[in-house]
Structure formats: structure tokens, C-alpha cells
Amino acid sequence: MKSLVFTAMLFFTFTSMAIAREPRPAPPPLPYGVRPVDPLHCPKTHSIKGNINPKKGARIYHLPGGAFYDRIKPEVCFSNEKEAVAAGFVRSRR
């Protein structure tokens, strides 16, 4: 029984190592805007944060200085409001 457990442990260890080593494919390009540089920040050239609510599908953009700007984790970043509106986003009310 011990050898069976040991064999199973080795199998899962090596398969998980193999999976972890495979490089992740690059995300596809966005049809609008650019991707954030990290979970909370947009590039300096694209400072408007676009946020998509996964449950409701609402698309809201946040301007620097807005009430929630520093807490928003953007899915996309825009260079200007016109670009955000053209992508179907509406301005945050706060």
C-alpha cells in the first residue's frame, strides 16, 4: 500500500511540475484601449481606467481624481474619454 501511495505522489508531483513549466500564451490584443501595466495601474499615456462588471456587464470608465479611481482594478485603459465612449463605456458618476 505504501508503494502505491508513493507512486501516486511521484506522479502528481511530476505532472504538476510539467504543467507549471509550460509558458502561458500571451493574451489576445484588445479591440480597444490597452492592457493595464499591473492590477491597479494604467500606463501614463492611457490614464483612464475601464472596468467591466462580470455579472451585469456594465462598462464604466474612471477618470484620475475620481472617488474610486485609486481602488479600481482596470480591465482596460484608455487615452481619452472619446475612446472609452466609443468602446461602449460610460463615465463613473463619482
Image (cartoon, rainbow, N blue to C red):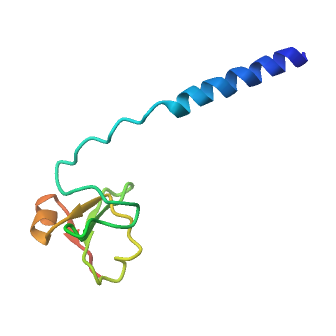
Q: Nearer the viewer, residue 54 or 41?
A: 41
Question: Which residue corresponds to the image point at 83% horizontal and 15% vertical from the top-left?
Answer: 4
Query: In the drawing, does residue 35 fall left or right of residue 18?
Result: left
Image quadrant in which you'd find residue 8: top right
Question: Which residue corresponds to the image point at 33% horizontal and 60% vertical from the top-left?
Answer: 37
Image quadrant in which you'd find residue 23: top left
Q: Nearer the viewer, residue 16 or 75?
A: 16
Identity of the residue furthest to the right in this view: 1
Which x, y percent locates residue 22?
Answer: 47, 30
Classify the position of the N terminus by image quarter: top right
Q: Nearer the viewer, residue 10 or 5?
A: 10
Which x, y percent locates residue 11?
Answer: 69, 20
Q: Nearer the viewer, residue 20 or 72?
A: 20
Image height of 14 relative to 50, above or below:
above
Question: Which residue corresponds to the image point at 22% horizontal and 48% vertical from the top-left?
Answer: 30
Query: In the drawing, does residue 17 fall left or right of residue 65?
Result: right
Which x, y percent locates residue 44?
Answer: 24, 70
Which x, y percent locates residue 46?
Answer: 21, 67
Query: In the drawing, does residue 69 fall left or right of residue 16?
Result: left
Image quadrant in which you'd find residue 80: bottom left
Q: How many marks?
A: 0
Classify the position of the C terminus by image quarter: bottom left
